[in-house]
Amino acid sequence: MQFVLSLLFISTFASASKFHIVIDPGHGGSDNGAVYGGIREADIAKSISLKLLEFLNQDSEFSYELTRHGDVDLTLEERAIQTNQSHNADLFISIHANSSKDRRAKGAEFYFKNLMSPDEEVIFLTKMENQGAPKKDILPPQFQHSSKVVQTILEDFHRKQKTRLSSELAKSFYSSWSGQKKRKSTAIKQAPFFVISNVKVPSVLVEVGYLSHSKERRLLKDSNYQKEIAKSIYKGLVSYKTQIQKDKNAN
Ligand SMILES: [Zn+2]
């Protein structure tokens, strides 16, 4: 019995120690996202996500799940709820392709949820694709029954911690990125996108490049370039994981 129990413990520990990534291919179904030259953002996001899975499949340190399988409609709320209900999720990545009226705009961008004031968020949201999305709590479930005062302190702590780790994740993606990218100061941004604001785990929204830029669009639809991007994201995940484990061991 003792032996069976220790085996059970080992197998639970082994699976729990995997780093679990929730991958969210943006848009899908009737929501194309940006469309330029017949190329749909939804397809680019899905294709890069599937290529990322190939890298994660070869690394036993990681496990993953997708928010959407295939070309289906999924609301932003459903994506956030699925992530928050995934008990072992360590982080969340939402994959998108960008577009701009300025056809010269190009290069990948990495967004994480900031600590903007509500007023700044309102101004920002009016400019962004997720305009008007409702905001929800980011408190982890285990703290929900605490007293109001403790809850506020823990909520604040959790929010700051999530922001710090999300910022680390965005930096790791930037450093590992081998595709087209901007200067660091303009590539890593803070924004209250709905999905990254409403998941409890560290999260980054990756805009892999601009579909409105003709040269970049040609790259983005190329399978080899998509693979290169997927590999960059994978390498970013590996370096983030290594860094936070180093931090944990140092504490
Ligand atoms: Zn998008």
Image: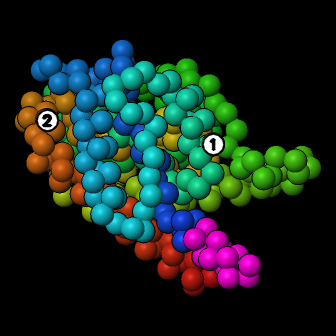
Q: Earlier in the sequence, mark 1 or mark 2?
A: 1
Residue 11 in magenta stretch:
yes
Residue 247 lies in what quarter of the image? bottom right
Q: Which residue lies furthest to the top in this view?
A: 30
Q: Is residue 54 visible?
A: yes
In the rendered structure, find residue 44 and report the number of the disc placed on it. none
Rendered location of residue 15, percent (x, y): 54, 65
Residue 68 in magenta stretch:
no
Pair 1/2: label in front: 1
Residue 13, above or below 127:
below
Mark 2, residue position: 221
Q: Is residue 184 visible?
A: no
Q: How is the image coloured?
A: rainbow
Label 2: which secondary element: loop
Q: Quadrant of the C terminus?
A: bottom right
Q: Which of 194 and 188 is in front in this view?
A: 194
Residues packed near mark 2 inside 10 Å, few (<14), some (14 to 19) or many (20 plus): some
Magenta stretch in the rendered image:
1-13
Three-letter code, disc 2: Lys
Three-letter code, disc 1: Gln
